[in-house]
Structures are given as structure tokens and as C-alpha cells.
Amino acid sequence: MKSETVTITDNSTGKSIECPVLRGTYGPPVIDTAGLYKGLGMFTLDPGFVTTASCRSAITYLDGEKGILLHRGYPIEQLAEQSSFLEVSYLLIHGELPTKEQFEEYETQIKKYNMVHEHLMRFFNGYRYDAHPMSVMVGVTGAMASFYHEEVDVKNPEDRLKIAYRLIAKMPNIASKTYKHGIGQPFIYPDNSLGYVENLMNMMFAIPSEPYELHPKAVSALDKLLILHADHEQNASTSTVRLSGSSEANPLAAISAGIATLWGKAHGGANEAVLHMLEEIGDPKNVSKFVARAKDKNDDYRLMGFGHRVYKNYDPRATIISKACHEVLDEMDPHSELRPLMEIAMELEEIALKDDYFIERKLYPNVDFYSGIILRALGIPTSMFTVFFAMARSAGWIANWLELMEDPDFRIGRPRQLYIGSEKRDYVPIDKRG
Ligand code: CMC
């Protein structure tokens, strides 16, 4: 078969090079520009990576125009309906759904690793009670790298898998301790008679002095929420984990860098920002005022939970989550005080979806628009929302890190730049500067 190429010509010199065109399973073809510097002495510039593929990946595919999201080929709708977060984490890491025996073995391993070193607990005490939980997550996950430094050889596949399992196992433990530290309650140890999500809820909400009863609906809603956040292709935090990992840094340090990136409100921090926004709007009758602000060119106000770099039709995760949100409120808490917030969210969605500004820019509700309401209904405080996102996304981060480390093209990530600073000039001693 004739290989496909694209010819790139430098009009100033008339020199041309042929760049190979690569085709994946799905998605637009990709121009391999690696030979551009050698051939034409040029770099490419693409701020925000709008059209730049940073790697080859077999983990997740998303089609933003059609609203499709596949993990290892399986549609997110089917995974959310039929799978569990733990199974999805196995799928992301190993590439295939586990057999019954493989899943049991995986669950046993995860349970084996779910404790954290007692000394790690001391790190929590270094934080003020009101520290933002994401800052604690960044610090404690980074600190955990020191507990597994000598024994993780990033070039050894067995060590890599072991640290991946350790991460999946320990994240609920760390996340719940972040919460317990903030409210001044004693840390709760993992209980291996419980499933993964049950254990997480138990560590979050149980107290030593009385029994804690798990609500099965809450467990299944949280499980679904974790599945929906488990991975999302080469987003900012995943790309950060890959870039950190490319220097052969400790994988837990790379994950800590991913957590830091997720924190921002343009990324994972949006779920927290949505709740603050709904509370600020306060009443469905105020919605149009806030929509007008979001449209005003002179106001940098944005509707949180709206818009996505890739989804230009709808976010399939938002469709699943909005249905789950209604179910949680109807079944678990029909008279919930969250009803007014839900009404504001629905009014906002309705007004925005009919508005030309949002239609023209293809701005739809994203996964974070309703996730905060579910988390709040489950009793999880707003400042912990992004922590739950981080816990779920750890599965995608570590799957991407494993893929990076196994990539035959592995090398340190080192983007280039277009320098626009001063021309070369001479140093002027301080007493001679005007
Ligand atoms: N409200 C009002 N206007 C918006 C919004 C919004 N939420 N999002 C984008 N726009 C406008 C923007 O002002 C611009 O208008 P114009 O063309 O007139 O200048 C246009 O839409 C394109 O926006 P952009 O900033 O170039 O788009 P982007 O792809 O760089 O940003 C985004 C994507 C998600 C950061 C952005 O839509 C946003 O800030 N949304 C709110 C925060 C949010 O919900 N983030 C969660 C993303 S989903 C979870 C995750 O993956 O982490």
C-alpha cells in the first residue's frame, strides 16, 4: 500500500519535506512532524495542544463531535451501567476485562496493599485543619513516593505493576484521612470485609464509637461516579503525569504532579466551583442574570460545568451523571435540601442550551455540572469533591504512566518554544542602570 504523506514546503527557501501521515483505530489522521526540524529547521507551535497528539495510546478514545467515550474499546455507558470502578481500573491497567479468577486475585492484591505506613499519617498533622484537601493530597501523595523509592525500579515491569496496584489500593485511604484530619476525627483503618467503594465510605464516615451503616444506593452511586471519572485521554493532568514520568521520576511523585494539575477550576476543580456557583445564583429566577454575565465580553465570569476542549456536542458522562443525580435524590433523599440547587442547575441548563451564545460555541454541560450535587447528596463536603475526582483519575493516570514506560519510543518529554524575548544584550552594572 502506498504510504500517505503530507508535503510541507518552506515558501521562503522552496525546500520541502514529506511528513508521514499516521492512522489510528479511530480519530483524525496524525501528521508525524518529528522530521520537520531536521528537514526544514523548523518547529511547530500549538498553544494549548489544540491539534497536537502528544503520544500514541491504546487506553481511551473520545470523539468530541459525536459524544463517544471508550475505555479499551468499551463504551462508558456500558461500563457505568454494568461494571464497577475496581473492574474499570483493572481494565485501564491491563487492557482487558478480567476473568472471575483474575478479578478475585486483583481484589485480593488491592486489599493487601490498602494500608498506609503509620509514619505517613504524621504528614497529615503538618497541615492546618482548614488546609484545602487538594493541597493535602498533593503533599501526602508526593510524600508517599519516599516510602517506595528504593524498591521501585521504573525499568522493571513487576515493580511498575506493584506500584500501580499500591496507588489504586491506597488512594481511598489517603483521601479519607484528608477529610478526617480536616474535621478532627480519628482516622479509620481499611476493613477488608468490605468492597472497594464501601471501604472508602466507611473510612470517610465511620467513627470508632458507633457502627456505621452503608446505604447500598450511596455505594452504587459513588461507584458510578468513580467510573465516570476514571480516565479521559490526554487531558492536562494525565499529560502532566506523562511528562513527569518521562524523566523517570518516582511514579507517586508524578501522580502528585497530576493531582496538582487537576486542582484548577478549568479542570477537576470545576465540580467544586459548580456548587459554589449554584449557591451564589441562589434561586432559579436569578439564572438569566448569571447567564448574561457569562456572555458579557467585559466580564471574565464563566458558567462552571459548561464547555469542554474536546466535547463539542455533549459530554456522554454528563448525560449519565444527570440521570444518576435525579435517581440519587429521588430514591435516597426525596426531600433533600439539595432540591433547590438541582432546580437552579436544571434551569441553568435549559436557558443556556437555548441561548445562541452557548449554541454557537458548542458549550454543553460537562461531567462536573451534576457530579457535585451527587457528592453533596452522599454527604461529601464541597472541598472534597476534587479529591474524589483525583482518586478516580488515579486509575487513568497510572494506566497512562504504565503505557508510557512500555512505549518503544520512550524518551524524556521536552517541548520546544518560539522565543519572543530580548535580543542578546550586555549586562549593565546596577549603578549604571537608568
Ligand atoms: N462559560 C461561558 N463562556 C465560555 C465557557 C463557559 N463555561 N467556556 C468557554 N466559553 C467561551 C469562551 O469565552 C470562548 O468565547 P469566545 O470565542 O467568544 O472568546 C469560547 O467559549 C471558547 O472557549 P475557550 O476558553 O477557548 O475553550 P477551551 O477549550 O480553551 O476551554 C474549558 C475549555 C473547559 C476550560 C472552558 O470551557 C471552561 O472554562 N469551562 C468552565 C470550567 C469547567 O467546567 N471545567 C471542567 C471541564 S470538564 C472536566 C475535566 O475534564 O476536567
Image (cartoon, helix red, strand yellow):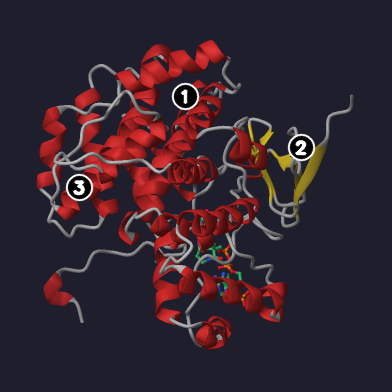
Most foreground residue, 82 or 272? 82
Residue at horizontal 47 percent and vertical 45 percent from the top: 217
Where residue 414 sits in the image (x, y, percent)?
46, 41
Which of the marked residues, 2 or 1, is nearer the chain's N terminus? 2
Name the residue type under label 1.
Met
Q: Determine crowd level at label 2: few under 14, some 14-19, many 20+ residues with C-alpha closer than 10 A.
A: some
Query: Gap between marks 3 and 1, in whole Å?
Result: 35 Å
Please name the residue shown 27% across and 41% down the image. 212
Q: Nearer the viewer, mark 3 or mark 1?
A: 3
Image point 60% across, 58% down: which residue? 309
Disc 2 to disc 1, C-alpha distance: 25 Å
In this view, the residue in front, 45 or 278, is: 278
Q: Would you say the residues marked 2 and 1 are in contact, meaning their CB atoms lie under 8 Å apart?
A: no
Residue 12 placement: quadrant: bottom right
Q: Is mark 3 within 8 Å of ligand 1?
A: no
The one of 35 and 22 positioned closer to us in this rendering: 22
Mark whose residue sits in front, 2 or 3: 3
Mark closer to the chain start, 2 or 3: 2
Across and down, in percent, residue 344 comes to 52, 76
Residue on which the image places disc 1 = 405
| Quadrant showing the N terminus | top right
Query: Which residue is under mark 2?
Result: 21
Instruction: Find disc 3 in the rendering and name its residue.
Output: 180
Above/below status of 313 relative to 353: above
Q: Would residue 302 appear left or right of 142 to someone viewing this image?
A: right
Relative vertical location of residue 273 with respect to residue 325 in this rendering, above or below: below
The quadrant of the picture showing ligand 1 is: bottom right
Instruction: Say which amino acid is labelled 3.
Output: Lys
Say which element carries label 1. helix
Which type of secondary structure does the marked residue at label 3 adopt?
helix
Q: Nearer the viewer, mark 2 or mark 1?
A: 1
